[in-house]
């Protein structure tokens, strides 16, 4: 059997993850025929089909699922070797794959990127913005090096470092600016607008209001904080947003802001990475840079 290449394994992993030749080719920055040819050659070398091909989607065969687990281990090992070599040559240069959740990315990244560029001029940071569950999975699979999200993640294989604590702010229609700030019990009886399911900030907001996550809700679920704030301005209800989002999201909305009585509800924002990462020292140092950049904008 001919030697299996890392390129073939990377193309295989992309196709397994995307379930579509076109999207997998985009992820790998190659043409679809080139990716298809490599997959076909890999299956020929193995003498087994890795994918079940349908008109609109491809799925892993039973053998393909077993193969995927081993392929992921091989790719992780290869990336660890690359990182070790990079580390030996020069401190923190090359590619760094950073994941960030949507309720942090647009508000924190601009000033963090400026600080990181000044500290690590040869570092090529590639950003992945998505939900916490996906970031955790991709970090565990070795497709991300680190992530900035709400803590705790509580994964035994991850190291967590707290960056800062952030307060929640109540957003109400402009005409309610003079009204008393409702208690958590009162807030639970109001029309509370939330992010759609899957966002950790949704769960945190429900916790603040002591609303069970299993309880059916009659509200408006959005995919972004911007939409929530604009809907509050239109009189549809009230919402909670993290403090860092206030300057961006409320500047063009007819809303009023209110802070809760002490102790104010907060979330803990931090960085996580695999305990097995060869970049632990660099990532810990990077966390101090991110923490300082966040404090400057507070």
Image (spheres, grey):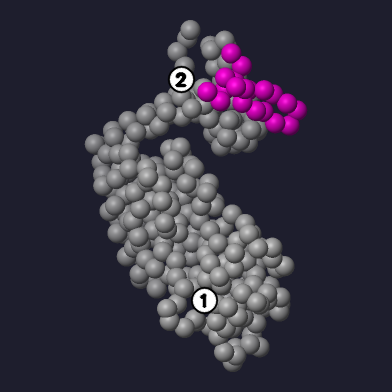
Q: Quadrant of residue 57?
A: top right
Residue that numbered label 2 is attached to: 5
Q: Which mark is residue 2?
A: none
Residue drawn at the location 59% of the way across and 54% of the way down: 198
Counting the numbered discs, the total is 2
Q: Can you give x and y, in whole percent of width and height, for residue 243 in the image?
A: 48, 73
Q: Quadrant of residue 52?
A: top right
Please indicate whether residue 243 sits to the left or right of residue 277 in the image: right
Q: Can you give x and y, in whole percent of width and height, for residue 176 in the image?
A: 63, 87
Query: Which region is colored magenta?
Result: 48-66
Q: Which mark is residue 169?
A: 1
Up/down of 16 relative to 115, above or below:
above
Residue drawn at the location 53% of the way across and 11% of the way down: 45
* Residue 125 visible in the current orientation: no
Pick the residue in front: 60 or 20.
60
* Quarter of the figure that contains the C terminus: bottom left
Residue drawn at the location 65% of the way across and 82% of the way down: 173
Q: For mark 2, give the secondary structure.
A: loop
Up/down of 146 relative to 235, above or below:
above
Q: For mark 1, give the secondary structure.
A: strand
Mark 2 and mark 1 lie on one chain; the one further toward the N terminus is 2
Please indicate whether residue 231 sits to the left or right of residue 275 in the image: right
Q: Can you give x and y, in whole percent of width and height, for residue 256 in the image?
A: 59, 83
* Residue 209 visible in the current orientation: yes
Residues packed near mark 1 inside 10 Å, few (<14), some (14 to 19) or many (20 plus)? many
Residue drawn at the location 43% of the way across and 81% of the way down: 262
Pick the residue in front: 206 or 4.
206
């Amino acid at each position: 059997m001919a030697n299996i290449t890392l390129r073939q394994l990377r193309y295989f992993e992309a196709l397994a993850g995307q379930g579509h030749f076109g999207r997998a080719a985009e992820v790998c920055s190659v043409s679809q025929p080139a990716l298809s040819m490599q997959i076909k050659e890999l299956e020929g070398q193995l003498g087994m089909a890795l994918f079940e091909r349908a008109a609109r989607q491809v799925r892993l065969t039973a053998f393909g699922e077993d193969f995927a687990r081993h392929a992921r281990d091989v790719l992780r090992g290869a990336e660890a070797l690359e990182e070790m070599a990079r580390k030996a040559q020069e401190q923190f240069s090359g590619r760094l794959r950073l994941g960030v959740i949507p309720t942090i990315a647009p508000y924190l990244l601009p000033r963090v990127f400026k600080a990181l560029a000044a500290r690590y001029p040869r570092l090529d940071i590639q950003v992945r913005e998505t939900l916490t569950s996906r970031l955790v999975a991709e970090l565990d699979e070795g497709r991300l090096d680190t992530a900035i999200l709400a803590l705790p993640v509580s994964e035994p294989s991850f190291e967590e470092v707290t960056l800062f604590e952030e307060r929640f702010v109540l957003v109400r229609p402009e005409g309610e600016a003079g009204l008393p700030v409702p208690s958590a019990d009162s807030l639970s009886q109001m029309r509370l607008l939330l992010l759609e399911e899957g966002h950790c900030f949704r769960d945190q907001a429900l916790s603040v209001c002591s609303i069970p996550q299993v309880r059916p809700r009659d509200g408006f679920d959005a995919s972004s904080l911007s939409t929530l704030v604009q809907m509050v301005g239109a009189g549809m209800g009230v919402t909670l947003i993290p403090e860092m989002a206030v300057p961006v999201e409320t500047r063009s909305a007819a809303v009023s802001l209110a802070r809760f009585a002490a102790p104010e509800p907060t979330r803990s924002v931090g960085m996580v990475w695999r305990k097995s990462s060869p970049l632990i020292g660099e990532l810990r140092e990077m966390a101090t840079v991110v923490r300082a950049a966040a404090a400057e904008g507070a």
